[in-house]
């Protein structure tokens, strides 16, 4: 199989995937190195395929929208690193999907990082990875202020999630 055929098969796998697929899984599938897969993904992106990378693997972005059919909204929040776990559980336990985090950096402007946290196990994996890598939250660069894109079943359900975040005292007032 040549590189072009491999990229077509990667695209097919991502198109039909329900969950994310890691570079290691793809490398094993095609008998190539992880770095070859990372290069293949970069080439697919250059060719206008919207592939999102998370700490749990790759996902074709259009699959997120079509698979969930969720209402998407944004919330602005501010909290400490210690409140992160409560924030994530509040969103997920209320039935939301946490798509990303955005910060407005004073030099770089808007920085967006995909999260795709849908289940309590995703929260645990994210927190473990942050701890293991000794990572800093993006929001630490903006005194805890950040924006999340959240998926909810309906606009009313999204409003309920916002209310839950407000009760935690972390929702930034929109007034």
Image (cartoon, rainbow, N blue to C red):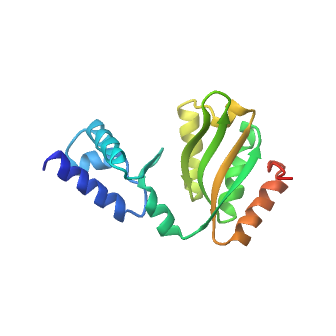
Horizontal and vertical percent for residue 44? 32, 48
Image quadrant where residue 111 sits: top right
User: Does 109 appear above or below 43?
Assistant: above
For this orientation, the residue located farthest to the left is 1
Q: Say which residue appears at 63% left-offset and 43% top-offset.
A: 102
Q: Observer-nearest residue: 175 or 99? A: 175
Horizontal and vertical percent for residue 119? 57, 59
Q: Observer-nearest residue: 145 or 134? A: 145
Q: Say which residue appears at 37% left-offset and 50% top-offset.
A: 48
Q: Say which residue appears at 75% left-offset and 43% top-offset.
A: 83
Q: Observer-nearest residue: 43 or 160? A: 43
Q: How many marks?
A: 0
Q: Say which residue appears at 58% left-offset and 68% top-offset.
A: 70
Horizontal and vertical percent for residue 160? 76, 66
In the figure, is residue 43 to the left or right of 54?
Answer: left
For this orientation, the residue located farthest to the right is 175
In the figure, is residue 45 to the left or right of 6?
Answer: right
Q: Observer-nearest residue: 44 or 128? A: 44
User: Does 173 appear above or below 103?
Assistant: below
Horizontal and vertical percent for residue 127? 60, 42
């Amino acid at each position: 199989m040549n590189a072009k055929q491999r990229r077509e098969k990667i695209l097919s796998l991502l198109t039909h995937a329900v969950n994310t697929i890691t570079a290691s899984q793809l490398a094993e599938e095609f008998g190539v190195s992880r770095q070859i897969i990372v290069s293949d993904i970069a080439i697919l992106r250059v060719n206008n395929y919207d592939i999102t990378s998370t700490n749990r693997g790759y996902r074709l972005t259009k699959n997120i929208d079509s698979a969930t059919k969720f209402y998407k909204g944004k919330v602005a929040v501010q909290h400490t690193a210690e409140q992160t776990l409560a924030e994530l559980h509040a969103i997920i336990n209320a039935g939301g999907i946490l798509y990303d985090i955005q910060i407005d950096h004073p030099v770089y402007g808007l920085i967006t990082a995909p999260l795709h946290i849908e289940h309590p196990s995703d929260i645990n994996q994210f927190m473990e990875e942050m701890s293991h890598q000794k990572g800093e939250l993006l929001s630490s660069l903006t005194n805890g202020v950040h924006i999340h894109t959240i998926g909810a079943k309906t606009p009313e359900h999204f409003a309920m999630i916002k209310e839950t975040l407000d009760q935690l005292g972390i929702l930034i007032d929109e007034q």
